Amino acid sequence: MSGLIGRKIGMTSIFDENGKNIPCTVIECGPCVVTQVRTKEVDGYEAIQLGFDDKTEKHTIKAELGHFKKAGTVAKKKVVEFKGFETEYKLGDIIAVDLFAEGEFVDVVGVSKGKGFQGVVKRHGFGGVGQSTHGQHNRLRAPGSVGASSYPSRVFKGMRMAGRMGGENVTVQNLRVLKVVAEKNLLLVKGAIPGHKNSYVIVQK
């Protein structure tokens, strides 16, 4: 899928032509630089690598500096490969937010907010032991029984328990593009997308 790398700015809302208030997310999308072109002859598949968001030479390793120098650009913080571009691009080409058009649908990939170590009520939606009745005076948010006794004498893999929550790759599909502000590289998509403010996201067509 073709697409661009972006940064989540935050959420706002706009009014449509019927006066309805629509919640939307603002994404700073591109401009992205083509930093590598994958070909079937050399790599076994076709794709292009895009770089987004400049970083200083001081914080870049020598191997990366050489890689970006070939493309004639400064070092980039975020690099992602995309397939399925209809146009052929060369090293150093710049792809802007006008790749997208108002009204079309996109998929957005991001890393969800990390919630730390959470219990089963927050993490899996448990109701607590006995639904706060039957004498459960201090175990309202406990997971309850997790297994049998002599058999299987263990806890099955995948048992829903307390643990680290969030910080995972999440894809939200079929978000409608409400507005494209080309001069400011902004993309407004309907609804919410994963990640905290200023986190990197991948917008796919």
Image (tube, rainbow, N blue to C red):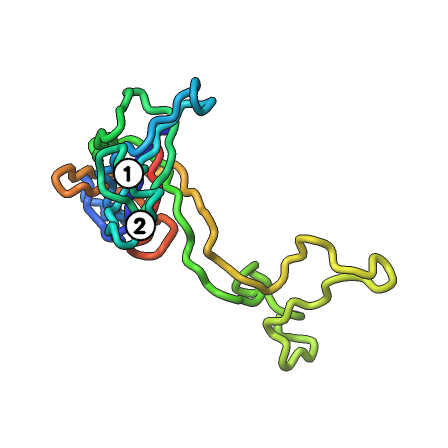
Horizontal relation, residue 70 to residue 144: left or right: left
Residue 137 position, x and y percent, is 64, 81
Q: Residue at x 56, y 59 (%)?
A: 124
Query: Outermost residue, left direction?
Result: 183
Q: Quadrant of the N terminus?
A: top left
Determine the secondary structure under disc 2.
loop
Closer to us: 81 or 123 = 81
Q: Nearer the viewer, residue 148 or 18?
A: 148
Q: Give above or below for 151 relative to 14.
A: below
- Residue 97 image-quadrant placement: top left
Callout 2 amino acid? Thr
Marks 1 and 2 sit apart, C-alpha to C-alpha, by 10 Å
Give residue 94's position: percent from left, percent from top.
21, 32
Question: Residue 176 at what x, y percent from top left?
Answer: 30, 37
Residue furthest to the right in view is 150
Do the numbered discs 1 and 2 sit on residues whose CB atoms are within 8 Å?
Answer: yes
Q: Quadrant of the C terminus?
A: top left
Q: Which mark is residue 60?
A: 2
User: How dense is the environment of label 2, judged by Cα within 10 Å: few (below 14), some, or many (20 and up)?
Assistant: few
The amino acid at mark 1 is Phe
**Vertical arrangement, residue 64 with respect to residue 128, above or below:** above
Graded by Cα atoms within 10 Å as few (under 14), some (14 to 19) or many (20 or more), the crowding at tag 1 reads many
Q: Nearer the viewer, residue 125 or 50?
A: 50
Element class at badge 1? helix
The answer to whether residue 193 shows anywhere in this view is: yes
Q: Viewer-proximal residue, 68 or 20?
A: 68
Which residue position holds label 1?
68
Q: How many marks?
A: 2
